[in-house]
Image (cartoon, grey):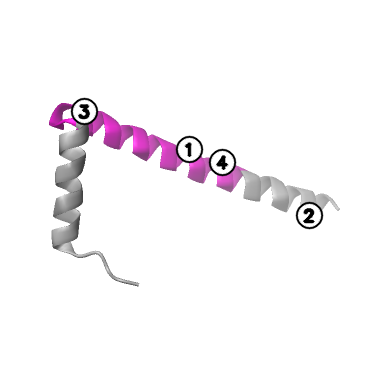
């Protein structure tokens, strides 16, 4: 599997800037960060509930 290097990341960043515009990038990054945080929190809650159910059994 090929690795992604610095030149490839620069190209991807330029494409994102062209598509979304520089003004919308902070909001886009914030939205992605919140989505990842919520996903992690839900997975942790699911694991905690699973542990509680195993202890109760």
Sequence order check, earlier mark of 2 and 4: 4
Compared with 29, 49 (above or below) is: below
Q: Is residue 48 left or right of residue 33?
A: right
Which residue position holds label 1? 38
Tell me the residue at 18%/46% (across/down).
13
Compared with 3, 32 (above or below) is: above
Magenta: main secondary structure equals helix
Tell me the residue at 78%/54% (across/down).
54
Within 10 Å of the Cα at label 4, are there few (<14), some (14-19), or many (20+) other Cα atoms?
A: few
Q: Secondary structure at mark 3?
A: helix
Sequence order check, earlier mark of 4 and 3: 3
Which residue position holds label 3? 24
Tell me the residue at 21%/28% (across/down).
24
Q: Quadrant of the N terminus?
A: bottom left
Sequence order check, earlier mark of 2 and 3: 3
How far apart are labels 1 and 2 at the CA level? 24 Å
How far apart are labels 2 and 3 at the CA level? 45 Å
Q: Are marks 3 and 1 in contact (CB under 8 Å)?
A: no
Q: Nearer the viewer, mark 2 or mark 3?
A: 3
Q: Secondary structure at mark 2?
A: helix
Which residue position holds label 4? 42
Q: Are marks 1 and 2 in contact (CB under 8 Å)?
A: no
In the rendered structure, which segment of residues is drawn in magenta?
21-45
């Amino acid at each position: 599997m090929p690795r992604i290097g610095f030149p490839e990341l620069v190209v991807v960043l330029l494409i994102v800037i062209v598509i979304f515009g520089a003004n919308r990038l902070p909001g886009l990054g914030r939205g992605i960060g919140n989505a990842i945080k919520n996903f992690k929190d839900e997975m942790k809650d699911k694991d905690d509930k699973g542990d509680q159910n195993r202890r109760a059994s």
